[in-house]
Image: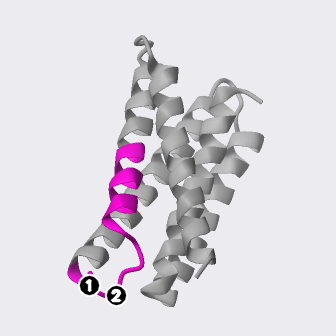
Amino acid sequence: MSLNELLVYGGYLALLFVILLTYKYSKRVTVINFLTFLLYTFYFLYGLYFKSESGSGLFWGALILLFTGIHFGGIVIYLVLKWINNPQETFVNKKYLLLTISSLVLVVLGVVSRVSHWPFGNLILFAGAVIFCFTVVFFVIKHTNK
């Protein structure tokens, strides 16, 4: 499995985790986001696997990453606005919010630096992914013990 495939699958897992976080605020928003995710993912994966002749596979792969990133960013903005507007109803500590946003920034910087062939791109990307994974693990451990 190449690093590009790991980026796509990691992006999918992060997006699904963030979509599940919206379930507390609105079941309708969660269902709409999940169906939207499935719709554009299946369409772009179909294009990637069955319509990628003469080099258009790069285009389909870029569309998958672009739409997943935009969707992820939109849901994170939605969650941050919900957490700011209703701090007493939130189950997320500011520490988890800060770690999630910082890991998102590190992953984006790592991807951009890796694509641009800058030094330390893989290290920055790996650091962001590790911070995100530890944040998810500690968040799940804390809320399953209650």
- Mark 1 vs mark 2, CA separation in Å: 6 Å
* Helix, strand or loop status at disc 2: loop
* Helix, strand or loop status at disc 1: loop
Main SS category, magenta section: helix
Q: Is residue 78 left or right of residue 9?
A: left
Can you identify the residue that label 2 sits on? 89
Callouts 1 and 2 close, C-beta under 8 Å? yes
- Please tell me which residue lies in front, 54 or 89: 89
Residue 144 percent coordinates (x, y)? 63, 76
Q: Residue at x 29, y 86 (%)?
A: 88
Q: Can you name the residue that lies furthest to the left here?
A: 85
Is 59 rendered above or below residue 19?
Answer: above
- Please tell me which residue lies in front, 99 or 59: 99
Can you identify the residue that label 1 sits on? 86
Q: Is 101 colored magenta in this rendering?
A: yes
Q: Is 97 colored magenta in this rendering?
A: yes
Is 48 rendered above or below residue 95?
Answer: above
State whether residue 36 appears in this view. no
Quadrant of the snapshot with the C terminus: bottom right
Quadrant of the snapshot with the N terminus: top right
Q: Is residue 10 left or right of residue 70?
A: right
**Magenta-highlighted residues:** 85-104
What's the amino acid at mark 2? Glu
